[in-house]
Amino acid sequence: MFDYHVHTSFSADSHMSMKAACDAAVEKGIKEIAFTEHLDIIYPNSNLKWDFDYEEYNKEVRHLQETFRNRLTIVRGVEVGLHPSGYDSAAAFIDIGGFDFVIGSVHVVDDKDLHEGAFFQKRTLNQAIYDYFCCLNQQVKDFDNFNVLGHLDLVKRYLRYLNCSAADVKWQDYVAIIEDTLKALIESGRGIEVNMSGFRYGLGCSLPSRDVIKLYYDLGGEIITVGSDAHYEECVGLNIDKGVSLLREIGFRYVTTFKERKPIFNRI
C-alpha cells in the first residue's frame, strides 16, 4: 500500500515528526509514503506560516531514507495551495526543490479561507459550491506545475458553515464543470488523488466521492493516487486499503506512485 498525502511538523498544521510518521507507516504495512508538506504562498486570514525550509526538509528525508532503507520508500512531495498571485513563487519553489511528487489543491477562493469559514459568509449553498468549482476549474487550467489535483470536492468538508451537508447539494448541477476540470487534467497528463480524510471527518466518503472518481475513469483518466491526508500518527495509512478497493471496484487496474515527477503504475 502507498500513502501519498502525509503532513508532518514541516507543515503549519501538524506536529508529527517525520520519524513518527515513518514508524507508523511501517507498523501499518505501508510500503511507500509521500511527505506532501503545505506550500500556500497566498493564504489570507491566517496567522500560520504556510511554507517550509526545503533544505531542512530534504536533510531529514535523506536521513530517514537511509534509516528506513529496505523497509519503507520515502518520497519527497509538496502540496501547493493554488492561488493566481502565488503561481510564480510556487513554481520556483517546486523547481528548486526537485520534488518527486506535487499535489495541487485549492484552500482559498476569492481570497477567502475555506477552513475557517470566511468563504461561506454571504453565500448561499449553491453560490458557494458553484464559486468553488469555478475557481478550481480556472486554476487547474492556469497552473499546470503539479501532478495530481488534491481533494477535488474539498468544499463539502466545510458545509457546516452554512448549516448544510453534502446531502443538501444537487451535485448533478455541477457535473459539467467537474467534467471540464477532469478533462483539462487528463489532457495535460495530470491526475487526481483519492483523499481518504472524508471518512475521518464524518462525510462517509473519499474526496472526491465515488461518482467523481467514476467520471474520471469513464473519461479515460489513469493517473490516480491514494492518500490519508494524515497530520497525526494514528491517521497515517488510515483507510488507504478502502481507497484501493474503491478504485478496483470502479475498474482501475493501477494506483499511481511517482519518482522525479514521473508516474509509476502499480497493479492493484
Image (cartoon, grey):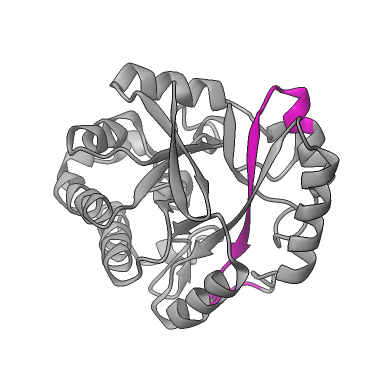
Q: Residue at x 41, y 51 (%)?
A: 148
Examine the rendering and report whether any part of residue 236 can be seen: yes
The quadrant in which the C terminus is found is: top left
- Please tell me whether residue 37 belongs to the stretch shown in magenta: yes
Q: Is residue 230 left or right of residue 121?
A: right
Q: In front: 167, or 7? A: 7
96 lies above or below 164: below
Q: Is residue 124 left or right of residue 96?
A: left
**Res 188 quadrant in image:** bottom left
- Relative to 71, say whether 111 is above or below: below
Quadrant (top left/top right/bottom left/bottom right) for the N terminus? top right
Give the residue displayed 68% in from the left and 34% down from the top.
235
Residue 65's x, y, as percent? 77, 46
Q: Where does the image place residue 254, in percent across and percent down from the top left?
A: 39, 28
- Depth check: give the residue in front, 160 or 33: 33
Q: Residue 96: which quarter of the image?
A: bottom right
* Image quadrant assignment for residue 156: top left
Left or right relative to 227: residue 139: left
53 sits left or right of 132 in the view: right
Q: Residue at x 24, y 54 (%)?
A: 181
Q: Is residue 52 shown in magenta? A: no
Vertical relation: 241 (above or below) 140: above
Where does the image place residue 145, in percent across and percent down from the top left? 41, 66
Give the residues drawn in magenta, as a range.
Answer: 24-46
Q: Is residue 16 visible?
A: no
Residue at (80%, 61%) from the top-left corner? 59
